[in-house]
Image (cartoon, rainbow, N blue to C red):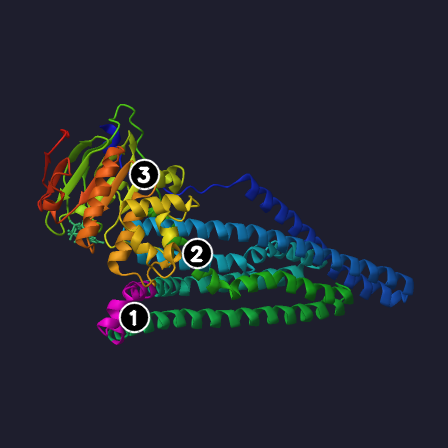
Amino acid sequence: MSDILAYPRPVRAPRQITLQGLWIAVLGLLLSIGALGAMLAAPLLTMHVFDGVLQSRNGDTLVALAVAYALIVLLGGALRYLRAALVAAATDAAGRQLQFQALGASVRGALAGDRTRGLAALRDAGEVRRLLGGAVASDLMDLLMVPAAVGLLFVLHPYYGSLALLGCAILTLLGALADLTTRKLVRAASNEQARVTAALTGRLRSRDMIDGLGMLPAILRRWRPDAERSIEIADAAQRRARAIQELATFVGLVLQMATICVGIWLVTYHHATPGSILAATMLAGMASSPVSRVVATWRDWAFGVVAWQRLSRFIADTATPAPPPANPSAPAGLSVEHLTLRTPDGLRSLVRDLDLSICAGQIIGIRGPNGVGKSTLLRAILGLSLPEAGVVRLAGEATYALPGRDGLAVVASRVGYLPQGAQLLEGSVLDNIRRFTDAPAEQAVAAARLVGAHAMIGRLSDGYGTPAGLTSGLSGGQKQMVALARAFFGTPSLLVLDEPEAGLDANLIRDLRAAVAQAQHQGTITLLVTHDPAGWEGIVSGWLDLAADGGWHFEAVARGTNA
Ligand SMILES: Nc1ncnc2c1ncn2[C@@H]1O[C@H](COP(=O)(O)OP(=O)(O)OP(=O)(O)O)[C@@H](O)[C@H]1O
């Protein structure tokens, strides 16, 4: 029982620092230091040319210094290029991984009944990828330049150093001010944008219904004030960020002018050489520009960070829960142990403490009034949603662990599922039946024959190559038949059918019942929800009745099923 009590407990998505990531960081740092050295050498050489060569008027020295200057600048450029390539490769890989994680989380979120947050997560992943793909990592590495340039300025003269230090401190304060004054606004704007877009996407999903009932103008009218509010908040954050950005540019200019003035004063009183003015101006620019760049792109950073935090939360919320350990002594069939379910929003209790043990080859019919929790029970049995308590095992293994183990191939070979409303995906009829695998077409045809869909598919414009999915021209009943063939594909050991007769004519319902009976002979366990129990009499091995108060009653009909 202890594993049942401990289950389910969501685990957080692991955050690992890989050896490869560490190598990339070290290499990026070394390249940055190399480029930094080359860039810092340039002002010093300039100073040397100005002070030494102009006074001595030695042409050979000038040529040698010019060549050295060119080499240093080339070396700095090459190192920066290499660093940019390395950073781009690393951030591209990280961005792709993040996109895949977001996609996985979106699918898990959708399975748990939350599609809109999944769509927002995909957009957030795009935002973070855009940020990573920009100059963010390079800008961060360029911050190394600040202490190095300020240090050199102190070597030239403490006045130069102090001035640069003051300038950088003011720029950093401006960055902090930007963060303080707009952080809340940026967070609110980003969250509001995500919410408004998700709400509209959710409402626009049922295209036919919206068009059919002429609801589009009303939906857009409702959406508009929310959208305008979110744009207003984003604009306010933008205005503040821009003002601070302008101020940062101004501080950078003042720093350069002040450096020249201090230089002239130092030269006048023989504390420094004229060349030092040039070198100091260049170094002051090098010290302040990385800080200015970070302040200038701060708004992108802030939006990216909010998107990243929201995405991390979503990934953690939808992380695959730690499965309970396999139970080798559990019966070979399907066992439902102390299963308690709630509605997806967690507000209402549905089935309570359900215990069932179903052997291979048994067919269990599930009955109950609308909204009692039949579909929710099927989804929990398949491991698609988390129960409040309890566990469902197929051959000793928690069904919740199935999708996470070997990818979907494991589930595809063991489970057949017909959800309510068919839910075909964009792709051909053949692709849908064979679940987008490369399985031989004959297997898909066999499944279609079994459920009586083969003749109907043959009459379609392009047979098995006919497009299915939302935009297809298949009728509701045709979609249901393709979805049934998909459920029966590959002789699953567990077949879960949610109102399989929906939309089928009398002949097809007869074929369906024959298919279920045939699967029974192959040892398949079938669970089916039906509102027409009379039609399944003589086929089912037992009935599970669900009551509105969470109670349940199991009645074996044939070949004794233990409850
Ligand atoms: N996304 C959701 N958020 C909140 N409650 C939900 C959600 N989806 C379903 N429910 C509630 O969960 C309960 C069980 O739904 P479920 O679809 O399992 O019922 P059902 O017995 O299959 O109904 P029907 O026979 O009408 O198909 C219902 O009362 C429904 O209102």
Q: Is residue 43 left or right of residue 562?
A: right
**Residue 216 in magenta stretch:** yes
Q: Residues within 10 Å of mark 1 (few under 14, many from 20)?
A: some
Q: Which residue is mark 3?
A: 491
Q: CA distance from mark 2 to mark 3?
A: 38 Å
Residue 152 in percent (x, y) is at 69, 56
Q: Measure how far apart labels 2 and 1 are at the Cα level.
A: 23 Å
- Mark 1 belongs to which amino acid? Asp
Label 1, label 3: how many angstroms apart (C-alpha)? 50 Å
Q: Is residue 303 magenta?
A: no
Q: Name which of mark 1 and mark 3 comes first in the sequence.
A: 1
Quarter of the figure with residue 473: bottom left
Query: Is label 3 in a helix, a strand or a loop?
Result: loop
* Horizontal and vertical percent position of residue 108: 34, 48
User: What secondary structure prevails in the magenta region?
Assistant: helix
User: Which mark identifies residue 382?
Assistant: none
Which three-letter amino acid code belongs to the residue tagged 2? Ala
> Where the N terminus falls, by quadrant?
top left
Range shown magenta: 196-217
Q: Which residue is mark 2?
A: 125
Q: Name which residue lies at 85% across and 68% down.
A: 54
Depth-wise, is mark 1 or mark 3 nearer the camera?
3
536 displayed left or right of 152: left
Taking the spot 84% from the left edge, 63% from the top edge, the residue there is 52
Q: Give whichever of discs 2 and 3 has the lower sequence position.
A: 2
Q: Residues within 10 Å of mark 2 (few under 14, many from 20)?
A: many
Q: Which residue is mark 1?
A: 226
